[in-house]
Each structure stands twice: as C-alpha cells, then as structure tokens.
Image (cartoon, grey):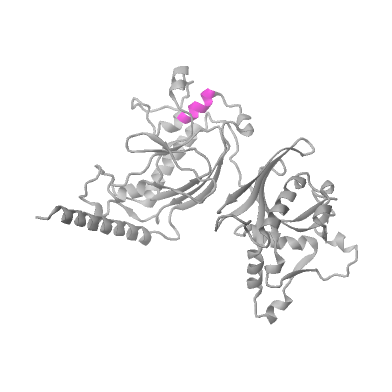
C-alpha cells in the first residue's frame, strides 16, 4: 500500500506524462496546413455614431441575438424552427441581454485573445459569466480552451463558452485561432483515458471534419440571421500609409496639390510600415547613398536593416472620411547619425525645373526649421499632430523611448481625425500620448 506522499508523487508523475503527451501530439499535428487564423477586430460600440446610423430598432437587434443564440436549429421546446420571422414581444425583449457575438466555443485546439477594453465574457463551470482581462498598454493574452483540446483530454479540459457583450464603448481585439492539420484524428488521447473527468463520449472525428460541420452550421445560422439583420457591407481592411517626416516636399499634383507634406507611401502586403517610410524618399527625387557600403563590406540589405532600426514611429493616426473606409497612417522620424553612415542624395538628373513634369507624383524636398514649418500650406490635421510628434522625437533623442520609460516600452502619439462635407473638412479630432510595449 502506498502512503499518502507516494500517491501524490504518482499523481504528479501521471499529470506530467499526460501534459507531455498532449504537447507532443499538438506539435506533431501542427503544420503549414493547420486550421489557424489571425484577426484584428474593431467593435465600434452602441454609442458610435456610425453604428447608430444603421437605425436598428431594439426588436431588430435582439432578434439577431436570439436567432444566433438559439443555436443549431431548435427552439427552446425542441421543435424545429421555420424560416418565418416573428416580432419578439416586449416581455421577451426584456428577458434577453443584447450581445455583440452570442455564446459559442471555438472549433480549434485553443485561442489567444487580447482586448483593449471590456467586452469578452467567459462562462465558468458554474455557468457564471465573467469578464476577461483587459490590457490596453501591455501584450497580455487570454488563453481560451477550444473543442479539440476538450476531446483530446476526454473532457478534463473543457472548451470555454464565451461571448462578446454589446458594449457602449469602442473595443479593439487581436485573436489567434490555433488548430491542427485537417486530417488529424481528434479523440481522447491514451494518457487521458480512464482518468477522473467529466463524462465525454464524443465520436472520433478529424480536425477538418469538425471544422466543416461547425462552419456549415454557422453558415446556416448566418443565412437565417441575414433575413432580419440590417443590410450593410462587411468592414474592409484599413489602408495603411507610412510617412517620413524628416523633411517636407511640395506636391505638384494629386490630392495634396500645392501643399507641403512629409513623404508618404502606402504599406505593401508583408511590408513593415518603417520600410514603407524608407521607400517614400523616392517621392522627393531622393535616394539612399549606398555607394560606400561595398567598401565597408556591407550589403544593401544590411544597410537597409540599419536604416529601419533607426526609423522610429512617433505617431499612429486613424483617418475617417479621407478615403473610403478607415485609413491608418504611421508617422516616422529617422536618426541618420545612427544609420551606419547612410545619407540621402538627389536622384541623378540635370536639375532642370521641367523634370517635375516627367514625374508628377514626385516632390522637390526642402528642409524647414521647426519654427518655420508652413502649417498653413499643409493638410489640416498636420498642425495638430506634427508638433507633438516632433516634441516626442526630441525627448527620445536618437532612440525609441523617452527618459523614464520602462525597459521595452516606448511613447507614441495616437489619435483619430474625422473629415466630412463636400470639401472633406476636418470635423473632429482626438490625440493622446501613450506608453506601449507593442
């Protein structure tokens, strides 16, 4: 007969062995074809002017929630639902809590989620809804157990039901779904068979089959929901631009014709905003002088990496009403003193003024003292954020963080500008300085 201490040691060994098998099995079946995805999401909140402009009635909104929350095809009494819609009574309305995304579990093995403000709610084993943690200024993620993990562990680890509340405030979230290769068998692993755990008799399946079944059921719910949901286009991905504000150029044509700006380029897929900002110098008939690099034994890629490491983001701004949809612009300064001797030189040309007509998208560069920046001849928003970004750059010197900032963190100006009317005038703005470890 084992003593009590021996029993505890044996339990610990069994748990360690089970955990090792679980980790090994996940890694063996996690590859390029795995069911994984990453999403960056914005929930505008009930108080958002754009959300209110849909003119939802309370009945419409709750009808959407009810149709999703009822699940996979039955009413509360078990009878099959029909596609006929009915108006929800006022008593029913008062008994339903509006939510942004109804209760569900995820289809994969586990999910990582970060949110800036409250909204995600998790249901504990007692059936109580609890707020997930928020981390607006740090890289903190909530781990959510999903369906595959529950099946692998025979129910010892339970898939966490969760939902997104219908909040009055805006909320941003990052979500990473982590699944397996489609053909991976999903059943209770040997290390978890016979262990004390909730009754769990789910049939053997594969990751691909399980996702297929769940997506089909969700699509059916979505089809039903769209019959009453306000007909609005899905939000498109925002366009991203990067601007280098080391010097200014005057536009000869285009949307900024006759105005001074920094050098701006749209960020390409799989390109960092900092690298896009470095590309933007071509707008000013400038290029990077890399002729010295070969003599110094440096490749072009090495020099560009050095330049990118000395290109510091000072502001990140959102624009609405400028282009269709949301535009995000990253504002950078560049410390040339720390960039291994790289410098900006004019493109080879004969300096004839007529050259500007050959490249209408380009600008002639000009340096300005900070006190002489021509804000009256620049886009409306620049006079608001430019001085704050330059002040932050001075505080940070040639680096990425101001004095007193926590190690690994940096300061950043963030804000939003809204434009409206036929002439797209600035109608509102918000700006603040934050500390972030991102």
Residue drawn at x 37%, y 56% as measured from the top left: 183
Which secondary structure class fits the magenta region best?
helix
Q: Is residue 318 above or below residue 16?
A: above
The answer to whether any part of residue 327 appears in the image is no
Q: Residue furthest front?
A: 404
Horizontal placement of 204 versus 64: left or right?
left
Q: Is residue 415 above or below residue 76?
A: below
Location of the C terminus (image quadrant): bottom right
Horizontal placement of 242 versus 195: left or right?
right
Residue drawn at x 20%, y 57% as measured from the top left: 9
Q: Position of residue 173 (x, y in %)?
A: 52, 45
Q: Position of residue 272 (x, y in %)?
A: 62, 59
Q: Quadrant of residue 309?
A: bottom right
Task: Assess whether residue 59 is covered by the magenta stretch.
Answer: yes
Q: Which residues are magenta?
A: 58-65
Q: Residue furthest bottom?
A: 295
Q: Quadrant of residue 282?
A: bottom right
The residue nearer to you, when weighing 19 against 238, is 19
Q: Position of residue 257 (x, y in %)?
A: 83, 50
Task: Assess whether residue 237 is covered by the magenta stretch.
Answer: no
Residue drawn at x 63%, y 51% as measured from the top left: 412
The answer to whether any part of residue 140 appears in the image is yes
Q: Position of residue 356 (x, y in %)?
A: 86, 61
The residue nearer to you, when weighing 176 against 214, is 176
The residue nearer to you, when weighing 16 against 431, is 431
The residue nearer to you, when weighing 102 against 341, is 341
Horizontal placement of 313 versus 68: left or right?
right
Q: Residue furthest top?
A: 90
């Amino acid at each position: 007969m084992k003593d009590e201490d021996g029993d505890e040691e044996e339990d610990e060994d069994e748990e360690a062995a089970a955990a090792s098998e679980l980790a090994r099995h996940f890694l063996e079946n996690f590859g390029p074809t795995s069911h994984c995805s990453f999403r960056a999401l914005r929930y505008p909140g009930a108080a958002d002017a754009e959300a209110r402009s849909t003119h939802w009635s309370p009945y419409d909104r709750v009808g959407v929630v009810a149709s999703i929350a009822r699940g996979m095809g039955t009413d509360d009494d078990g009878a099959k639902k029909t596609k006929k819609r009915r108006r929800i009574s006022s008593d029913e309305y008062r008994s339903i809590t509006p939510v942004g995304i109804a209760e569900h579990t995820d289809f994969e093995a586990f999910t990582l989620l970060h949110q800036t403000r409250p909204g995600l709610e998790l249901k504990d084993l007692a059936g109580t809804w609890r707020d997930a943690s928020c981390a607006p200024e740090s890289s903190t993620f909530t781990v959510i157990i999903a369906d595959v993990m529950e099946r692998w562990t025979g129910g010892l680890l339970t898939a966490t039901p969760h939902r997104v509340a219908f909040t009055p405030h805006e909320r941003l979230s990052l979500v990473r779904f982590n699944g397996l290769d489609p053909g991976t068998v999903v059943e209770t692993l040997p290390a978890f068979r016979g262990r004390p755990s909730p009754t769990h008799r789910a049939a053997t399946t594969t990751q691909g089959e399980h996702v297929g079944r769940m997506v089909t059921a969700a699509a059916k719910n979505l089809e039903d929901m769209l019959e009453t949901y306000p007909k609005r286009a899905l939000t498109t991905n925002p366009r991203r631009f990067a601007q280098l504000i080391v010097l200014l150029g005057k536009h000869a044509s285009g949307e900024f014709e006759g105005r001074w700006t920094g050098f701006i380029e749209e960020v390409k897929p799989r390109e960092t905003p900092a690298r896009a900002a470095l590309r933007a110098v071509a707008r000013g008939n400038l290029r990077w002088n890399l002729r010295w690099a070969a003599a110094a034994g440096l490749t072009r890629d090495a020099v560009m990496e050095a330049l990118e490491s000395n290109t510091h983001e000072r502001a990140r701004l959102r624009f609405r009403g400028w282009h269709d949809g949301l535009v995000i612009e990253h504002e950078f300064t560049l410390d040339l003193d720390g960039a291994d001797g790289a410098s900006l030189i004019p493109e080879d040309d004969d300096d004839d003024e007529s050259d500007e007509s050959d490249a209408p998208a380009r600008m002639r560069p000009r340096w300005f003292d900070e006190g002489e920046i021509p804000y009256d001849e620049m886009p409306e928003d620049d006079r608001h954020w430019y001085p704050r970004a330059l002040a932050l750059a001075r505080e940070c010197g040639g680096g990425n963080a101001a004095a007193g900032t926590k190690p690994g963190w940096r300061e950043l100006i963030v804000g939003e500008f809204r434009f409206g009317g036929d002439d797209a005038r600035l109608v509102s703005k918000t700006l603040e300085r934050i500390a972030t470890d991102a």
